[in-house]
Image: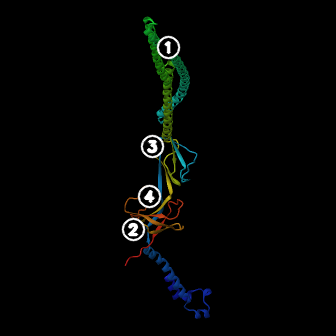
Amino acid sequence: MQERLFADEEHPQEQPAAHAEPPDGGRRWPWLRPGLKIAVGLAVVAVFGWLPLRAMWESSSVEAVLNSRLVTLRTPIGGRVAATAYTIKDRAQLDAGTVVLRVVNSRSDRTRLDDLRRQKSRLENERPNIAAKLETARAAQQDLARQAAQFKDGRVLQLEARIAEIQTSIEAASARREEASAAVERASSLAKTGNVSTVELARLTRDLSVAQQTELGARKRLDAAKVELTAAKGGSFLGDSYNDRPSSVQREEEMRQRAKDLEADLVRVDTEIAWTANELIIEEVRFTDLSEADIRTPVAGRIWEMMTSPGEDVQSGQPLLKVLDCSGAVITANVTESVYNRLQLGDDATFEPNDGGNPISGTVVNLTGAAGAPANLAINPDTLSKEPFRVTVAPRDATHCMVGRTGRVVFARHETAP
């Protein structure tokens, strides 16, 4: 360009006549054309010289790529992969919690589950039988208790009547004793005058003794009857040939004890049924977890890599697919050693895409240096091989999973302390 400018100045007569300046204009502005050419040349030199100068002045990466973390989904059980209602498409957008695959194990051990179900069924069939026996025992106990109460009431009435009879006998014996005592007193007075013989006095004295003994025996029988009455009211029955409770009372006590045993059996069966039902719920959950498993996406993102397909047999812990975590987007960049040594965690940075898109602002969150790159990123930073010093920048705004866009990262410049 400079040569053209000088050539035009040395051979002005070679310009076509059609473009020649009017004689008056040429003489009026003789310096206009050379000045314009010099200005254009200086502008070109300034633009193309400023670009490398700006690159030297800014702290920027050598290369960078928009990246994101990967989440690997593994199967918790062994079995066969089954399709779901969700149609899996490559790079499909997924919401968190979406069921993308299902693993079914048809060979799960269900022995304990079947045993618990049989045990619960047996206990549930046994309970009505125990309940029916308990109702029968309670009815028999009530009937025997009624019989025992009737026997007790009758025995008490019988003893009360006997006591009344004995009291009457005592009163009669007392009257005879008093009469015999008066007769003896009269006979004793007459015997002194000789009006009553000694034999008659002896007979009257004997009658008095018999009357006294008869009254005393009646009083003894009264005491015994009162003892029997007190025992009968307490539930024990005394007699000449026995000292025990009647058979109705004994049978009532036996039936009461049987009813208590049946109540204990019913409580035991109910407790076992409740325990078995709880264990059955736990075992059903365990069996379900071992027989089938839904593979859900833990985060919102995209399917990055499918590592299996429906119908394939898989082992426990085997990776099935990788999901791109759109919420964990980062920018990985490599920088020169001089730039790396000037960076600090928390520095502001701007990602400038090579395709001319809008810049993405962020913050420096990791300075890896020459250490190994993380293995859970969609694009391995090792592919950025121009410089070994690696920097990770977290964008401030969502990037909509634009993984793979290349560009460079410009870091905020630190002022050098004096």
* Dot 1: element: helix
Q: Are marks 1 and 2 in contact (CB under 8 Å)?
A: no
Dot 4 or dot 1: first in sequence order is 1
* Dot 2: element: helix
Counting from the top left corner in percent of width and height, residue 159 is at 52, 19
Q: How is the image coloured?
A: rainbow
Nearest-to-viewer mark from 2 and 3: 3
- Residue furthest to the front in view is 193
Nearest-to-viewer mark from 4 and 2: 2
Q: Which mark is residue 215?
A: none
- For badge 3, the amino acid type reads Ser
Nearest-to-viewer mark from 4 and 3: 3
Q: CA distance from mark 3 to mark 1?
A: 117 Å
Please, is residue 389 above or below residue 29 in the view?
above
Please, is residue 250 above or below residue 124 in the view?
above
Q: Are marks 2 and 3 in contact (CB under 8 Å)?
A: no
- For badge 1, the amino acid type reads Glu
Dot 3 or dot 1: first in sequence order is 1
Dot 2: within a 10 Å radius of its alpha carbon, few (fewer than 14), some, or many (20 or more) residues? some
The residue at the point 46 percent across, 41 percent down is: 78
Dot 3: within a 10 Å radius of its alpha carbon, few (fewer than 14), some, or many (20 or more) residues? few
Judging depth in this view, the residue of 89 and 413 nearest the camera is 413
Would you name the residue on which mark 3 appears?
316
Counting from the top left corner in percent of width and height, residue 218 is at 47, 16
Dot 4 or dot 2: first in sequence order is 2
Nearest-to-viewer mark from 4 and 1: 1
Q: Which mark is residue 179?
A: 1
* Dot 4: element: loop
Would you name the residue on which mark 2 appears?
340
- For badge 4, the amino acid type reads Asn
Specify the quadrant that holds the C terminus: bottom left
Would you name the residue on which mark 4 appears?
380
